[in-house]
Amino acid sequence: MMKTSTSKPQRFWRTLGRVVIFLVLLILAISFLYPLYYMLINSLKSLGEYYVNPFGLPQAKLEWQNFVTMISQFKILKLFGNSFIISFFTVLGLVVFGTLAAYSFAKVDFRGKNGIYMAILATLFVPAQVTMIPMYISFAKIGLVDSYLGVVIAYLAMFLPETIMLMTANFKSIPNELLEAATIDGCGYFGRLRNVVMPMGWPAISLTIIFFFICSWNDLFTPMVLLKSMDKRTVMVALSSLIGRYTGDPPFQYAGLLMSAIPALAVYAIFQKSIVKGMSMGAIK
């Protein structure tokens, strides 16, 4: 009897906790999805209908012309190409250099390793805005202003320390016995990296790819400073000028913003399982 009486309060608090967690997650989901919903319904409205009822569903015919104009006149697909080039080579550089550095910090012993690692992590506390002016002057002297390469190098400088920190923490969980077995089998430095470290560290690598692809895709500040030519603008830089030019046409603006969000959302939707696995790897250990 005593056991039954004490188990009921436990079940009650356990159920209450689950309900509270569900409600909190539901509120967070709604708060994250509502901006997309708001952009979608208003991008399909005419200008007059938007000003009459900006929060309701479209009542008249759907205005697909906003998207057609965005593709045909605003050339948003060309802007997608510019952004994709920068984001692709950014994540490629992060994976290559980040994997090599993280493997060395996690599994290779060399003089001054801890000091170098702490120096790299210290750069995380330096705001990008502080380094932008000296970086712009340096890039101007060597001809990297108004080039995709300059933007990619700037992103590598900003994102590589965080990439190294993430991958190093993950690679440390790889058993040393596996690396020793690979060495006995004849694997050298790059053999162990290719056959052991990268397969077992894939969750952290995939998380790096998705997170920094989205960061570089959505960034406005760096390409706005470094890219001067109109034909090299990224989609976010172009949309910022769109908002200034078409302030009186919110449905057209929402169509552009919604289209610009699709690639990042698609990448996240495809790799969401890898993201969750990568974020939970340390906890599982």
Image: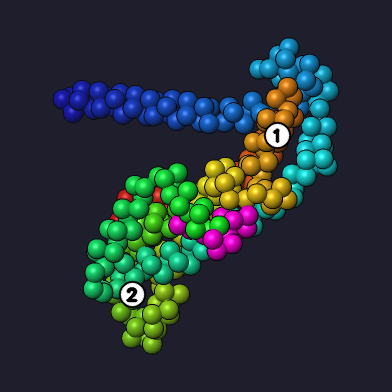
**Tag 2: amino acid:** Leu
| Image colouring | rainbow
Q: In the image, what residue occupies the spot 30% across and 23% down?
A: 12
For residue 186, the mark is none
Q: Which residue is mark 2?
A: 178
User: Does 145 appear in magenta?
Assistant: yes
Closer-to-camera residue (88/225): 225
Q: In the image, what residue occupies the spot 68% across and 30% down?
A: 244
Q: Residues within 10 Å of mark 1 (few under 14, many from 20)?
A: some
Principal secondary structure, stretch drawn in magenta: helix
**Tag 1: amino acid:** Leu
**105 is higher (above) or lower (below) than 277:** below
Q: In the image, what residue occupies the spot 70% across and 34% down?
A: 242
**40 is higher (above) or lower (below) than 234:** above
For residue 242, the mark is 1
Which quadrant, please, contains the C terminus?
A: bottom left
Q: Quadrant of residue 204?
A: bottom left
Residues in magenta, as a range: 141-157
- How many numbered marks, from 0 up? 2
User: Does 256 appear in magenta?
Assistant: no
Q: Which x, y percent locates residue 150?
A: 56, 58
Residue 98 in view (yes/no):
yes
Spatial separation of the CA atoms under disc 1 and disc 2 = 54 Å
The answer to which of marks 1 and 2 sits earlier in the sequence is: 2
